[in-house]
Image (cartoon, helix red, strand yellow):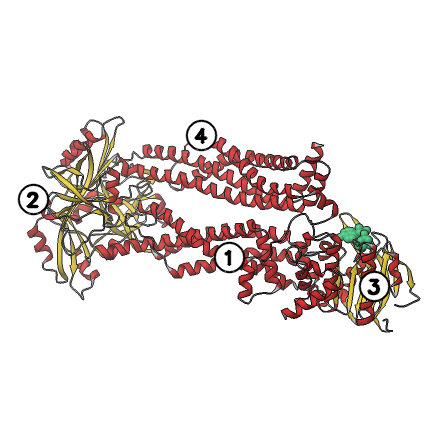
């Protein structure tokens, strides 16, 4: 559910990467707002700056210029440790490449993402199992990443992001490795969570069809906002 | 095809340039040290031989009580004798600016003719002035390190009398640097051990004799006779001629070429082995490091290797490409190190020799050394490369293509984790660390080995020092019950000794002894030996028997183990001894570990073989309550007494506290550097290998302090294992060391100082933690954004 309160303000952010002699302008001045409880889709061609933008939102990285303000706090000016703390308390993350720990089982991979905040072991296990079940791979709970297919690993990563139950969920191409059917199920699940819990969801995707479940879609091209489309229907 | 594969492999190897270079550097150091040390020893030997020539070092030396110089004038005419020097040698004290009563080795020599044997080579000034007998010569290095120069004035103290002298010459002499450090004098005379700062001083002999025989007795006597032989003469024949020239004057002890020179050469043989061992150790470390480096290269390229395989390259071809590149790199490294090693070693050795006033000679290096270096250098790298490259077989092309993980990458729940859980440690940090350790068991093992090696070497160092000191102290405490050791200037008879010692109040009881240098026929070969005749069942001595029993009947003797081994004597052997004019056959009934390299005979029996009673000294027990130092001084003041030492002074082989600390600290420092290198390298590699995982933890909200703590937990865990392992390892090393030490001190017993062990344990952990700092700093600079973009899966 979108409320009318603005949660995130992105103010003219730019991001440059230096690659030896050349400078890559990954983001060339982007500004927009994200409402509390909004389901926002970010679309764009490969290399258009989607991951870069998400990394600014999740405070994994800081913009070269411009500001990102989340719930009144400027996260683009925070120290590294403050940003870490921000991620720990405020965002659930699902990476483009699933980034699981090879030495931990599926269940443990979910647990490690929330273990800092949930000390009770029973509760930890219960919560992790619940989200594995939600993404449909509870039967693989004791498998190690190298014993799972790419799509299964991706779903573990999604479960880890969701299990955090944080106010903001940031996902980078969460369904890139999934078949159409599973993929649709995941998007439906995200939409359901968004509606039920009021969590703000920001997801990068290549699938145009996602704009149907999203409240709004932002299109990036060469590091700039190229278009915005509001979804007419909600839900 | 093959060219492309080689190019790709080269890129993969050079992708880890830093690590490859650091591992090859270790190979370089290994080869360099091996060649350099090997080049040092021939130079050392040749130079030492040349030095023996230059300074005309003796082939024979007799230490007598006092022999008139006239009496032995015939020695120089013996066939085969090249040169003779006789002198009066005493221990005294020298006081000069900044030094009060510094111990001094004072040699009374002929002021008219410089010594023919153990030559003095003038470095500054002139030889002794025959017209002014208060002129002295001082050894160069002692002079320079103690601020003595030509014209310096000193006060010498000999037998309690003081007189002033002036330095007229500074000389080079090898006596104090080369080891005729007499093992026979280890305890019963001040040791001229390398560490000591005893002043070597030469003076007109007549000055000493005025003090020695104040008013009475012969004046022109000597107590050391040094003889150098011409080449090619039968030594035994010459020995006998010399001994008969000295007769009937008793000899305390004799030294032959073996004692005078080859002891050092033997030590070189041991040093030679040590060099191989040391270089070997560097190679072992190099192999470890190459192993971890290659593992890292292979692992980080697992996906591309899998893809190469899907394109049709065989496992063997890929493995060959790695072996070829690393082999070539190792060969190049070796080829650079070899030609640098030889001059490096020579420069090093000549600087050492110069320090000891010797000149470095040139000596060719055996080609075998080059061959060994050429084989060992590249081969160690090939072996270290071979094992990690075997993993290539497991990189299935199918996984690479589907983008799956290339390695099994999991280990289940290791025992350590279960133990941790039982102990209540169950956080995800612990879990993660323990699993990644058991995933890479080899690396954890290397860390543990590195830490335990460091701990063990440090451990060995401290047992050496405490063992060295307590061995002598313990021996003296357990087997010697006297308080004072008295030496007479000349052998006396019972009445004379009684008259001398009875008036001294502090003396409770005393037992006379006689020390004689003589010959023994062992296995039909005539050998120079020393016999110590004492009261074997008295109350002042006990024997530390290695085998056999103590003396019970006449005709029985005991032999010190060092001498027994040297001469090939075992219990129950018969030995033909010459004593006075008698030739007696004695049976060796026991072998003992003792501080002196001598035969032990019953005092009363010895007296029966001599024409007259001869007592060269006495072991004294003082009355309870008396002060040993005071009694020693009182006895020393007696005219007939040459020396009077308390038991403490007699144990002069003990290392002082500073020397002991220096050795312990030195060994510990070396050990810790080794440890630092190993832990540093491995933890750095393992941290960079886990960078994606650590970055991800940070992305999930783990602060950098928490991550640093993970590294610390890991190193603490391996440190614990390392320290536990270092105990048996340290014992093993100490065992080797004991064997070596026993060649110096037969009754050497290692001793463990628990406080020291504790300190070493803590030092080990501390050093291991220090070694983690670079990795921890690197961890703080990880670029999460970049790392997260790369896949973790490879
Ligand atoms: N560390 C970096 N150094 C240099 N250039 C970089 C770096 N990271 C990203 N870039 C560049 O920035 C641009 C934007 O990258 P980004 O990852 O945001 O794209 P994306 O939209 O997520 O693409 P994709 O859909 O392929 O994931 C690209 O041109 C990329 O090459
Ligand atoms: Mg992307």
Q: Residue at x 48, y 34 (%)?
A: B342
Mark toward the viewer: 4 or 1: 1
Asked whether the beta carbons under mark 1 and mark 2 sit within 8 Å of each other, the answer is no
Circle 4 residue? B366
User: Dot 3: what SS?
Assistant: helix
Residue farthest front in this picture: A139
Residue farthest right in this picture: A232
Are marks 4 and 1 in one subunit?
Answer: yes
Q: CA distance from mark 3 to mark 1?
A: 51 Å
User: Mark 3 Cα within 10 Å, few/some/many (few <14, many 20+)?
Assistant: some
Mark toward the viewer: 3 or 4: 3
Chain of residue at mark 2: B
User: Mark 1 Cα within 10 Å, few/some/many (few <14, many 20+)?
Assistant: many
Q: Give the image quarter of residue B625.
A: bottom left
Q: Compare residues B397 and B786 and report the one nearer the observer.
A: B397
Circle 1 residue? B719
């Amino acid at each position: 559910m979108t409320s009318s309160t603005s949660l995130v303000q992105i103010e003219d952010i730019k991001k440059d990467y230096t690659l030896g002699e050349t400078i890559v302008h990954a983001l060339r001045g982007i500004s927009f707002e994200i409402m509390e409880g909004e389901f926002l889709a970010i679309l764009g061609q490969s290399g258009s700056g989607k991951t870069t933008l998400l990394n600014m939102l999740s405070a994994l990285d800081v913009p070269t210029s411009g500001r990102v303000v989340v719930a009144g706090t400027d996260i683009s000016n925070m120290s590294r440790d403050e940003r870490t703390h921000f991620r720990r308390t405020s965002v659930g993350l699902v990476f483009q490449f699933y980034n699981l720990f090879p030495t931990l089982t599926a269940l443990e991979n979910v647990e490690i993402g929330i273990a800092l905040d949930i000390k009770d072991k029973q509760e930890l296990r219960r919560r992790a199992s619940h989200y594995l079940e939600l993404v449909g791979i509870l039967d693989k709970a004791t498998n190690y990443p190298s014993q799972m297919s790419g799509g299964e690993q991706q779903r573990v990563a999604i479960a880890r992001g969701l299990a955090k139950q944080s106010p903001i969920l940031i996902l980078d191409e969460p369904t890139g490795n999934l078949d159409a059917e599973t993929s649709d199920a995941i998007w439906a699940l995200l939409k359901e969570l968004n509606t039920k819990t009021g969590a703000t969801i920001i997801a990068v995707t290549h699938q145009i069809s996602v704009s149907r479940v999203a409240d709004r879609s932002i299109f990036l091209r060469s590091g700039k906002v190229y278009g915005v489309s509001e979804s007419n229907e909600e839900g | 095809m093959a060219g492309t594969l080689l190019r790709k492999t080269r890129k993969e190897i050079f992708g880890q340039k830093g690590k490859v270079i650091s591992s090859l550097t270790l190979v370089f150091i290994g080869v360099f040290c091996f060649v350099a040390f090997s080049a040092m020893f021939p130079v050392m030997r040749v130079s030492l031989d040349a030095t023996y020539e230059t300074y005309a070092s003796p082939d024979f030396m007799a230490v007598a009580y006092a022999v008139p110089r006239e009496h032995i004038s015939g020695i120089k005419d013996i066939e085969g004798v090249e040169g003779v020097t006789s002198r009066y040698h005493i221990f005294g004290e020298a006081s000069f600016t900044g030094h009060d009563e510094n111990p001094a080795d004072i040699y009374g020599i002929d002021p008219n003719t410089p010594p023919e044997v153990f030559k003095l080579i003038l470095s500054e000034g002139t030889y002794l002035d025959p017209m002014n007998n208060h002129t002295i010569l001082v050894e160069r290095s002692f002079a320079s390190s103690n601020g003595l120069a030509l014209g310096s004035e000193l006060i010498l103290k000999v037998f309690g009398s003081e007189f002033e002298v002036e330095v007229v010459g500074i000389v080079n002499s090898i006596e104090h640097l080369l080891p005729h450090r007499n093992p026979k004098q280890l305890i019963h005379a001040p040791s001229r051990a390398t560490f000591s700062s005893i002043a070597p001083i030469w003076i007109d002999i007549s000055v000493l004799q005025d003090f020695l025989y104040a008013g009475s007795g012969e004046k022109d006597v000597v107590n050391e006779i040094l003889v150098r032989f011409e080449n090619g003469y039968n030594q035994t024949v010459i020995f006998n001629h010399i001994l008969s020239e000295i007769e009937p004057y008793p000899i305390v002890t004799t030294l032959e070429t073996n004692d005078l020179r080859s002891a050092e050469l033997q030590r070189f043989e041991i040093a030679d082995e040590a060099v191989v061992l040391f270089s070997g150790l560097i190679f072992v470390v190099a192999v470890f490091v190459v192993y971890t480096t290659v593992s890292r290269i292979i692992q980080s390229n697992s996906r591309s290797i899998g893809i190469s395989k899907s394109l049709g390259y065989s496992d063997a071809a890929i493995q060959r490409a790695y072996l070829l590149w690393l082999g070539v790199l190792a060969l190049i490294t070796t080829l650079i190190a070899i030609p640098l090693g030889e001059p490096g070693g020579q420069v090093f050795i000549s600087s050492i020799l110069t320090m000891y006033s010797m000149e470095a000679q040139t000596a060719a290096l055996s080609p075998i050394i080059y061959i060994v270096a050429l084989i060992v250098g590249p081969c160690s790298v090939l072996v270290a490369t071979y094992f990690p490259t075997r993993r290539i077989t497991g990189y299935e092309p199918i996984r690479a293509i589907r983008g799956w993980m290339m390695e099994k990458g999991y280990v289940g729940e290791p025992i350590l984790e279960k133990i941790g859980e039982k102990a209540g440690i169950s956080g995800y940090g612990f879990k993660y660390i323990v699993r990644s350790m058991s995933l890479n068991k080899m690396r954890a093992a290397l860390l543990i080995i590195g830490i335990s090696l460091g701990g063990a070497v440090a451990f060995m160092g401290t047992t050496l020092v405490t063992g060295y000191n307590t061995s002598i102290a313990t021996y003296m405490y357990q087997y010697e019950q006297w308080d004072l050791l008295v030496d007479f200037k000349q052998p006396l008879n019972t009445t004379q000794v009684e008259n001398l010692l009875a008036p001294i109040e502090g003396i409770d009881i005393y037992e006379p002894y006689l020390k004689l240098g003589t010959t023994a026929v062992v296995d039909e070969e005539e050998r120079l030996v020393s016999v110590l005749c004492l009261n074997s069942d008295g109350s002042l001595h006990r024997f530390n028997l290695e085998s056999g029993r103590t003396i019970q009947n006449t005709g029985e003797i005991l032999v010190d183990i060092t001498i027994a081994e040297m001469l090939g004597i075992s219990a129950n052997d018969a030995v033909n001894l010459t004593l006075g004019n008698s030739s007696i056959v004695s049976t060796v009934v026991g072998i003992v570990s003792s501080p002196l390299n001598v035969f032990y005979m019953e005092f009363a029996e010895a007296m029966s073989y001599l024409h007259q009673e001869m007592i060269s000294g006495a072991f004294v027990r003082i009355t309870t309550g008396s002060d040993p130092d005071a009694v020693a001084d009182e006895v020393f003041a007696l005219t007939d007494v040459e020396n009077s030492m308390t038991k403490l002074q007699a144990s002069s082989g003990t290392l002082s506290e500073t020397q002991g600390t220096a050795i312990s600290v030195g060994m510990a420092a070396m050990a810790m550097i080794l440890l630092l290198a190993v832990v540093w390298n491995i933890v750095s590699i393992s941290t960079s290998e886990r960078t994606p995982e650590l970055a991800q933890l940070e992305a999930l909200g783990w602060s950098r302090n928490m991550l640093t703590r993970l590294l610390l937990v890991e190193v603490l865990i391996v440190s614990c294992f390392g320290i536990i392992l270092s105990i048996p390892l340290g014992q093993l090393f100490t065992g080797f060391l004991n064997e070596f030490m026993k060649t110096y001190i037969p009754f050497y017993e290692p001793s463990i100082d628990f406080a020291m062990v504790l300190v070493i344990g803590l030092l080990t952990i501390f050093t291991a933690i220090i070694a983690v700092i670079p990795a921890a700093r690197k961890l703080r600079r990880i670029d999460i954004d970049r790392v997260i973009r790369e896949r973790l899966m490879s």
